[in-house]
Amino acid sequence: MKETVYKPDYTLHYGWRVWGRMIADLAGNHELIWRLMIRELSAKYRQSLLGWVWAVILPVINVIVFTILRKKVVPISDTGIPYQAYVFWGTTMWQLFAQSLVSSSNALVTGANMVSKIRISKETLVIASIGPAMLDFVIRVLLTLAVFLLFKVPFHAGMLIIPLLLIPYILLTVGIGLFLSLVNSLFRDIASVIPMLMAFAMLCTPSVVYPPAQEGMMKLLHIANPVSVFITATQNIIAGGSVTAPLLVGITCAYSIVLFFILWYIFYISSPRIAERI
Amino acid sequence: MNDEILIQVDHVSKKFCKSLKRAIVYGGMDIARNIFGRDVNSDLRQNEFWAVNDADFIVRRGECVGLIGPNGAGKSTLLKMLNGVYPPDQGSITLRGTIGALIELGAGFHPMLTGRENIFIAGAIKGMSKKQITKKFDQIVEFAELAEFIDTPVKFYSSGMFVRLGFAVAAQMDPDVFLIDEVLAVGDVGFRSKCYNYVAHVNKKAAIVFVSHSMPQVVRICDRIIVMNHGQTAFDGDLVTGIDQYRSLFPLEESSVTGSGEAKLHSLTIQGPKQDDAVRVSYGQPFVCDLSLSVDASHKSFVISTTFMNQDLQLVAQCQSSYNKQILNNTGKPMDIQLTIPQLMLNPGKYAFSILVYDSDNKKQLLWHHCIQNMQVVADFIGGAPVQWQGQWSVL
């Protein structure tokens, strides 16, 4: 018969078995994550005339604005790819990160009603909260492909690496999101700081500002900042078909994955303490 | 098989902090300690208090324990720990088998979504797979009696419909450990009886912990009582003593005197042994009350009404001279009056006895002595209803 034991600091006392628990818990909750994602998305557009069309309209307008704004001045980069294509892809990548962090840092507070009253896996709420950002990303990727066709950006086999790079990128995002949601459940300051920080951080990534600065402080920020590395790497793949700085990208991937597990561990260890303080 | 221990609460304590700022700082400190692999010191820090203090009990399969106590006694905190919402700060809780809960029904429902969609969400939160929910879907809708509104957003539901839907989803489980928090009072009479039947059905093979303030409910479904007070388990045992213990935690109503002042009560005694501040009267025995009063000479006659109020502040019984077709003529001098009720049929418990004096038309209140005397009705049982008839039973 299954035995459930609750005692002080019980997550801590799992020792090394904690990793097995973490993975088993998450796997056991995949259906709930999916359900909660659908819940968020369907509720979001339910009471609007256009409904799901909104999910497409906003990114489309985004593309149109970009295209019109840059129409007059379209510098062609050395690789022969129009500036918009770069910027649009960069923004798509950046938005996935920024949007996810804003929603995930708020996930536990938004779900406080559930967290403090019923037993629910807290990771589930945080991961489910990035559903809208993911959907937005998928739509933007499709639009990006359209933009590429429009500007006649050549497709090549190297682009198939991009989905592989997306895995550590998304893990990094989820990891940071888990951590921020934990901190935000105690210190609500996070919710106020994140949007502001994101606006600033965007300038440190090559999403709008392209090409990235080659010297000084900005260059350091660019290399040390994994988001920036991922964006540049994927942009370079689009331009040239290969990763231009494999060592840096490799290190960043490894670093992102390790960071994800560390932050997830911190979240998991602390999660029993969230309900009583949120 | 039936004495298998399913819930084991072993010296469990939980502390909370009175100050928000400190609670946050302590939370941050505790989390930081945990992250670096250190246990957290479980002693009280400044501004902290024990919400649950050394609770210790077991519940076996087939038992239903009523967890009662005044507000803030720690019942809900204990129940949340049992449900794994937060862990104890000291001690341990061991649960065996699957855990079901009727707590916070409808948590996780999204007001914008339809009943149908919310059933799937609530089911997923309870760990049911899509397949399981689909299989039980019709049963859930039928139990909730919401077939007509299943595709309506739940924000248009009445509060009763909302809770019914939550209950219906929760009632699809077949738990070994079942936790119930004060939810059986939802819905109309028909739905309530359905809920009771469900609980009775589960009770046959589960250990139940039931938190409630409603003694009739507790009497109806529990076979054992734990009284909590100030975070501690003050009593653990049978229903009669448990409910009595619980009642004794509350002082009865303050007595007060009002009225026109045209009548004056000199003395009042209810016959029977006195214990603490209450007179003990045995159930089924005569109730005798002696009183002495004087009424202003301008009234030729008067009416006396006596009332019995239980601890839920409900007037449960009354004995009035005019309804008994008795005329009390005024002598203008102090008068001694005796009231006898041949057989007292009040449910065992504590009652506040009040006396009112009216003029002959039963209109003007000459005197109202509210809660003049406390009395305790004693018997070897405790019932769910305020009046317990003495019946004659025969097999024909």
Image (cartoon, rainbow, N blue to C red):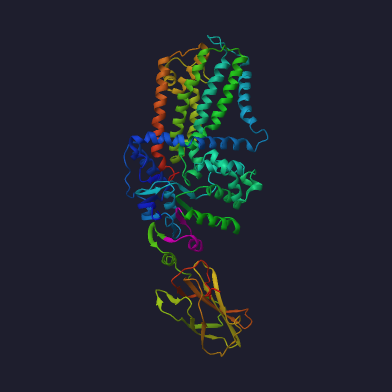
Vertical order, B379 against B235 (above or below): below
Which quadrant holds the C terminus of chain B?
bottom right
- Let me know if residue B286 is in the magenta part: no
Q: Is residue B308 left or right of residue B92?
A: right
Is residue B255 visible in this depiction of the protein?
no
* Residue B319 point in image, percent of width and height: 56, 78
* Residue A260 point in image, percent of width and height: 42, 29
The residue sitting at 48% across, 30% down in the picture is: A197
Based on the displayed image, in which of its 4 quarters is residue B68 positioned?
A: bottom left
Q: Which of these two is toward me, A197 or A239?
A: A239
Q: Is residue B32 left or right of residue B130?
A: left
**As drawn, which residue projects farthest toward the front?**
B396
The residue sitting at 45% across, 35% down in the picture is: A26
Q: Is residue B204 left or right of residue B133?
A: left
- Let me know if residue B210 is in the magenta part: yes
The part of the chain drawn in magenta is B205-225
Is residue B38 visible in this depiction of the protein?
yes
* Residue A171 point in image, percent of width and height: 45, 27
The residue sitting at 51% across, 49% down in the picture is: B104
Q: Is residue B149 left or right of residue B210?
A: right
Vertical order, B260 against B36 (above or below): below
Q: Which of these two is toward me, B172 or A109?
A: B172
* Residue A11 point in image, percent of width and height: 37, 40
Vertical order, B244 against B104 (above or below): below
Q: How many marks?
A: 0
Q: Which of these two is toward me, B284 or A254?
A: B284
